[in-house]
Amino acid sequence: MNDGPVRRHDGAFHWQGVDVLAYKQDGSAPFKDVTRQVLFDDAAMKAQLRYFEVAAGGHTTLERHEHVHNVMVIRGRGSCVIGDKVHEIGEKDLIAVPPMAWHQFRAAADAPLGFLCLVNQERDRPQLPDADVAAKAGGKP
Amino acid sequence: MNDGPVRRHDGAFHWQGVDVLAYKQDGSAPFKDVTRQVLFDDAAMKAQLRYFEVAAGGHTTLERHEHVHNVMVIRGRGSCVIGDKVHEIGEKDLIAVPPMAWHQFRAAADAPLGFLCLVNQERDRPQLPDADVAAKAGGKP
């Protein structure tokens, strides 16, 4: 049911009228078992809110860019690489990814990692690491 | 513990380094039992993410403004007035409040209502209703 300005959560991290999308185009960058849902992308807003879900054992692309991410975990647990550190993260933790920090989100081996990610509408494209940077980040290319 | 870019959730909808604030200055507008926490207010971002919590039986101010709200409920349940309709809302539902729509968030009588609210950094000030508008919205002034 479309209830006007309200879009309902279906109980399993899917929402009415929100498509489950590929995280990125296959082959464009390394990643494993990630989906993307755009929750708010309003012409009147200068930022978008997306929901990413990384399946158990999966990870996002290790990348960096000028734009910042404001993240809240809302499902499961895992870790995130930010710069040269790895942080354990769980439900409702807040993560701010600074400009040009290498970063990667990784689900636990036995649990998914689902998180909200706020970004400005206008933003630069990600850069990918060379082999040295990827190796320092812990070897998940 | 301050873990750099990660601010941890303490398990009760409070976060490391995030103050629990008054919703508004007392007497500036009608409301009942609401707190405000600013989760992300980053100079590099064009939007802010706040967490509001309305205690059981409480409600936010009935108001309108040009700027839009993008909302996700993350605790409890209740209802929201948007324009001339009242919508029941619960966990992880998404609500988009359009420009100049009268709106109010109300917790259930027996449960709190906690929600994330995304707004542009630059935004206009709320307008308050006259008695006719308030009465049409269901009599919670």
Image (cartoon, coloured by chain):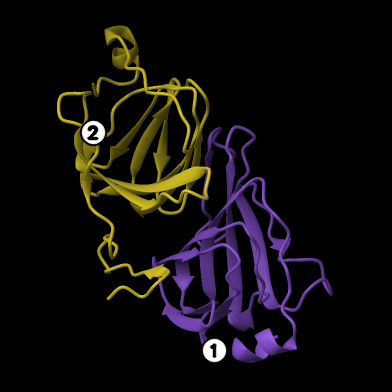
Chain colours: A yellow, B purple
At horizontal 24% and vertical 38% (from top left) the residue drawn is A23
Residue lying at 64% horizontally and 34% vertically, measured from the top left: B43
- Residue at 28%, 62% (x, y): give it: A17
Question: What is the x, y in percent for residue A32?
Answer: 19, 34
Note whether residue B85 is visible.
yes
User: Which residue in the structure is indicated by mark 1?
Assistant: B109
The image quadrant where one finds the N terminus of chain A is bottom left
Asked if B111 appears above or below B123 in the picture, the reply is below
Kind of residue at badge 1: Ala
Residue at 68% from the left image edge and 60% from the top image edge: B20
- B62 vs A137, left or right, is right
Return the x and y of residue B89 as percentages of the image width and height.
43, 76
Q: Quadrant of the C terminus of chain A?
A: top left
Q: CA distance from mark 1 to mark 2?
A: 44 Å
Q: Nearer the viewer, residue B112 or B95?
A: B95
- Residue on which disc 2 sits: A24
